[in-house]
Amino acid sequence: DGGITQSPKYLFRKEGQNVTLSCEQNLNHDAMYWYRQDPGQGLRLIYYSQIVNDFQKGDIAEGYSVSREKKESFPLTVTSAQKNPTAFYLCASRQVDNSPLHFGNGTRLTVT
Amino acid sequence: AQSVAQPEDQVNVAEGNPLTVKCTYSVSGNPYLFWYVQYPNRGLQFLLKYITGDNLVKGSYGFEAEFNKSQTSFHLKKPSALVSDSALYFCAVREASGGSYIPTFGRGTSLIVHP
């Protein structure tokens, strides 16, 4: 059954620690995306990748990093430089130009 | 630049009544328009899209949307609401050609259907 898997569903970290969120897809999609969702603010783009070994910053990339070593995987690292990391993080992928995004079920990160 | 506005944070409707969730957009050229639905603690699910052609687009779960170029709107509609339709709805837009091909999302509208 094809889809996008995000893990873990819930993640708790202490302030000052880096944390990596996993995103894996078996849809054979080229493009992958990371969004951050905060209440009342909709979805904000963190990073995106159109092809393996290439990625671009989105609107709120500061304090985040990504890699795209494999087509199936697009992990997101939330670094200690991110000032307000507590949020719901969504990974998505897209097949072709005018197709919709497919989303994972998200990871809720809480940093205390 | 592209943008999308969902003017209502929340829409309340009684079960069985028609519902409308509003969306207006701004792009430089022709738009691709999308509606998604999100249930609590889940990712977004695709409902429908407008690419070209017929202005009335039909999608999943009985939803439809009407593309209105002169009013730059793409309102989501359903003739008879169900309690199970209660969720967060997002409109998204991107330019059909040029640009970064990245969609821009609205802030979302919470739909509450009362029994």
Image (tube, coloured by chain):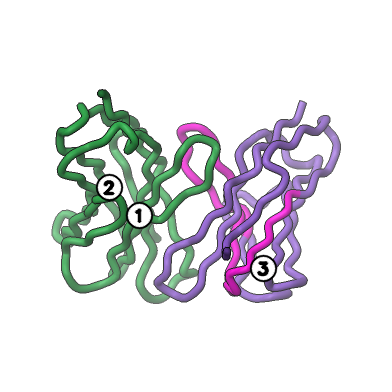
Chain colours: A purple, B green
Judging from the image, what secondary structure is the residue with disc 1 in?
strand
Amino acid under label 1? Answer: Leu
Q: At x 38% / y 36%, what residue is drawn?
A: B87
Judging from the image, what secondary structure is the residue with disc 3 in?
strand
Magenta span includes B34: no
Q: Which residue is mark 1?
A: B47
Using the image as rendered, state which of residue A24 and residue A31 is in the foreground: A24
Q: Is most of the magenta stretch helix, strand or loop?
A: strand
Residue furthest to the front? A1
Q: At x 63% / y 36%, what residue is drawn?
A: A87
Q: Say whether residue B99 is left or right of residue B62.
A: right
The relative height of residue B82 versus residue A6 in the rendered view (above or below) is above
Q: Which residue is mark 3?
A: A55
Q: Which chain contains the residue that carries disc 2?
A: B
Question: How would you rate the neighbour count of disc 2 (Cα within 10 Å): few for under 14, some for 14-19, many for 20 or more?
Answer: many
Which stretch is magenta? Answer: A21-47
Question: How would you rate the neighbour count of disc 1 (Cα within 10 Å): few for under 14, some for 14-19, many for 20 or more?
Answer: many
Place of residue A15 in the rendered image (x, y in percent of width and height, measured from the top left): 81, 31
Place of residue B25 in the rendered image (x, y in percent of width and height, measured from the top left): 29, 54
Amino acid under label 3? Answer: Phe
Place of residue A86 in the rendered image (x, y in percent of width and height, measured from the top left): 67, 33
Q: At x 34% / y 35%, what residue is drawn?
A: B84
User: Residue A79 lies in what quarter of the image?
Assistant: top right
